[in-house]
Amino acid sequence: MRTANGRVHPLHIGFVSTRFAGTDGVSLESKKWAAVLGEIGCRCFYFAGECDQPPEISRVVPLAFFRNPEINAINQVAFFQHTRPPEITRRIQDIKIYLKDELNEYIRQYAIDLLLVENALSIPLNLSLGLALTELIAETGIPVIAHHHDMFWERKRFLVNCVWDYLNMSFPPHLPTIQHVVINSSAANQLSLRTGISNTLIPNAMDFDHPPAPPDDYTLTVRRDLGIAPDEYFLLQPTRVVQRKGIEHAIELVSRLNLPAKLVISHASGDEGYEYEQRVRDYAMHLNAPTLFVSDIIAEKRGDTPDGRRVYTRADLYPHADLVTYPSDIEGFGNAFLETLYYRRPIVVNKYSIYDIDIKPKGFHAIEFDGYITEQTVEHARQVLTDPILEKEMTESNYQIASRHYSYRMLHRRLETLLRYAFGE
């Protein structure tokens, strides 16, 4: 494939986001895209405020990180007031200029052919970065794929603000060299209706053509280390502790099962505060539902804690879970849903809109509820937990359906189409 500057393969793809690190959905999905782009023959490089990629392929600029103290201070004004103080405007613009210079240097340093912007032109966690990208794209005409995981109008906390001019300009920008990609049909419809921007729908994916390896000896002590007795059922909540994840529903389910069971919450609170985590802890205590918060021993890589405890990955947990709970009220798509299917575990799902519209019609089998736990939900979960044959039928069917719709083969074809649109056949 030949680029505008005459270079042939390998294409240099420049990933850009506020963060490429940890277990958030954007970071996880970016790694999958990078893996498939590598199969196509591209080389991937990274620009972010926080990054866990090798330094030789990364440019880390702290002011690009949405949790940088200066960025956080801007957001505390931008999304809590109706009028914008002039000093905030000046600071946003000053950081924009600095980040645009850094982005230009990043493109030069790695001879980037195409920018792949992950959510930085979708959700305004870093206003200056979005503005910098918009101006750079307008000034250079560089080909761009803007991968939108969450749009600002989907989050209540962004709707009261004093930066509507910036949101309309850059989240997302309407420029001719940008191909816009969304992860669900609702976002596709809303993006077109609100902005007139055409887009491509590429759902989240997993490598269903290569099933996970069986659990190894390292994970033999998972249940013991989590605090789950041999005669107890292990229910896994594989998400951050944030309000839209609806974790109260999982706690209620545990309390109503009338089976020896514990709920394991794998992630910490993250970037949205700790008040909800305290609410979840209090609720679990009130319902006498055994709930374990284990984010201190869950990481991207295996290892040991400072006090000598074994550290596990999410992949280590899934095969040992008896049931996965996914009671979210809102999801852009559902990474944990696909992971559960990939590891062939049964799942409890709150019928969030994207599941109902995009996922369920494919024919998946899940233990469902609609906004609140019913006795039917509890009984269905109890049946799946106590009937291995029913569990196997459900999980095998789900794996086969997912492999047809959400595999790397699907992602490979759609990314190739985007690249051919940018650079020709």
Image (cartoon, helix red, strand yellow):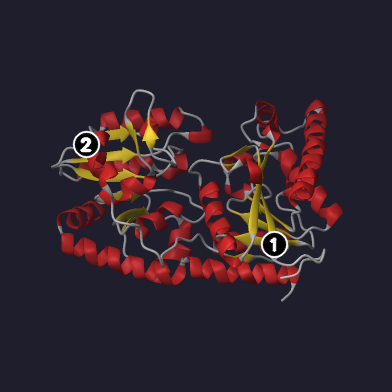
| 40 shown above or below 113 | below
Question: How far across and how far down the image is residue 413, in percent?
Answer: 57, 72
Question: How far across and how far down the image is residue 105, in percent?
Answer: 79, 44
Q: Is residue 85 left or right of residue 359?
A: right
Q: Which mark is residue 11?
A: 1
Contact between labelled residues 1 and 2, with CB atoms less than 8 Å apart: no
Residue drawn at x 67%, y 61% is: 180
Mark 2 or 1, nearer chain start: 1
Question: How far across and how far down the image is residue 281, in percent?
Answer: 34, 29
Q: Is residue 11 left or right of residue 98?
A: left
Q: Amino acid at mark 1?
A: Leu
Mark 2 to mark 1: distance in Å? 47 Å
The residue to which callout 2 is attached is 224
Residue with the most extreme bottom position: 425
**Mark 2 residue crowding within 10 angstroms, few (<14) / some (14–19) / many (20+):** few
Q: For the C terminus, which image quadrant?
A: bottom right
| 309 shown above or below 218 | above
Q: Nearer the viewer, residue 312 or 170?
A: 312
Q: Is residue 385 left or right of residue 177?
A: left
Residue drawn at x 26%, y 48% is: 320
Residue drawn at x 31%, y 60% is: 366
* Number of numbered discs on residues: 2
Q: For the N terminus, which image quadrant?
A: bottom right
Query: In which image quadrant can residue 278 be found?
Result: top left
Question: How far across and how far down the image is residue 391, in percent?
Answer: 22, 61
Query: In which image quadrant can residue 283 be found?
Result: top left
Q: State whether residue 182 appears in this view.
A: yes
